[in-house]
Amino acid sequence: MKTKWRLIVHGALQPSWNMAVDSALLHCTVEQPVLRLYRWHKPAITIGYFQDIEKEVNSELCRNDDVSIIRRVTGGGAVFHHEEITYSIVHPLQGPFGKGIMDSYALIARPFVTALKAMGVTAQYSPINDIIVAGKKISGSAQTRKEGKLLQHGTILVATDTEKMFSYLTIDPKKVKQEGKPVITLSEIVKDLTKERIYEQLIQAIINSFKEIFDIEFEEADITQQEKSVAFDLEQKYFSNEQWNCRRLSP
Amino acid sequence: MSIHVVLKNPGEKLIHIDAEFNGNVIATIHLSGDFFIYPEEAINDIEQSLHGMPANKKFLEQKIVELLKNKNIEMVGISASTIVQGIMEAFLQHEN
């Protein structure tokens, strides 16, 4: 019998709520794995758990442009979110998802590489946490493990304003020099579709790839009342709280 | 005075090290960057384990490796040797 996963497809939501829902799913999930796909109501930046906001982001410019800066519960780098599909997966640390951290990054990259292929895009997993197309980054992800479960969230770029992205993010020259990986977006590659059609097709391709690769069935449902309530508390306590978002500043 | 060192070793993530020294002893240490530590809260244990320790490469590396083992901490995109490399670079700047 096929394993049943819950599928949550959300539209464009507030940045702090997006992060709160991911964390609520991690806290509340008991057994059934979850795949959530969502978008962003307005441009926002998330920074990794271990990052120092002052070293990574031009906070003043973000404030002036009403771009929220939110600290994630996951490590990794700062991300400018705008025109993208973001995914989150919550899965108990069982079976192939319970193996090593690097193994699970590679495993979770598979359906996204396959989904991109279905859209005519040749992509490959680039360890630790990226998916690239012709050497350029189209997807990044970050994973945490808590209470016997993993939460991995990541992005697939549909379009982006690179000028704005690089004005908000202060990327260290050492990283640029060594990793390169300038970004590429789906709308640069899939030129015969409008952005909205790309979103629709990408969501469907991701769902199909998950079914095929993990041999699962989806039950589509929204977050529960309990998850909503936990997300509300987490949003207040963490993701819309400046103390959380500005912690880990250097002395 | 806090000394800031940035490292990006091949195959690893970027790490910022901010350190203050009292003689050859680490007075404060702050690590940040786009690496991963599991569990995340263990970064506090790593930083605390280095406070008050002598800036000695071999000693510090052993200290971190032991902590990782004893507390079942996993680091991805960063290594004990890179953290110590950064501390020693900061110490060198402190001495000069």
Image: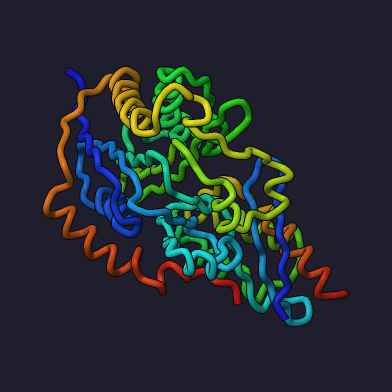
Does residue A151 appear left or right of residue B91 in this picture? left
Residue A139 x/y as whole percent: 49, 36
Does the rendering let one see residue B69?
A: no
Q: Residue A99 in the image: state x and y as whole percent.
A: 42, 34
Q: Residue at x 61, y 49 (%)?
A: B78
Front residue of B81 and B90 = B90
Nearer to me, A242 or B37:
A242
Quarter holding residue B18: bottom right
Left or right: where does residue A165 sit relative to residue B96? left
* Nearer to me, A113 or A14: A14
Q: Is residue A124 left or right of residue B81?
A: left
Residue A217, image x and y in percent? 20, 24
Q: Quadrant of residue A67?
A: bottom left
Viewer can see residue A36: yes
| Picture layout, residue A69 above or below residue A132 | below
Asked if residue A156 is positioned above or below residue B61 in the image, the reply reads above
Q: Residue furthest right?
A: B96
A7 left or right, relative to B10:
left
Q: Quadrant of residue A43?
A: bottom left
Who is closer to the viewer here, A100 or A247?
A247
Residue A83 is situated, as x and y percent measured from the top left of the image, at: 42, 43
Question: Which residue is pictured at 43% across the width and 52% down the height?
Answer: A74
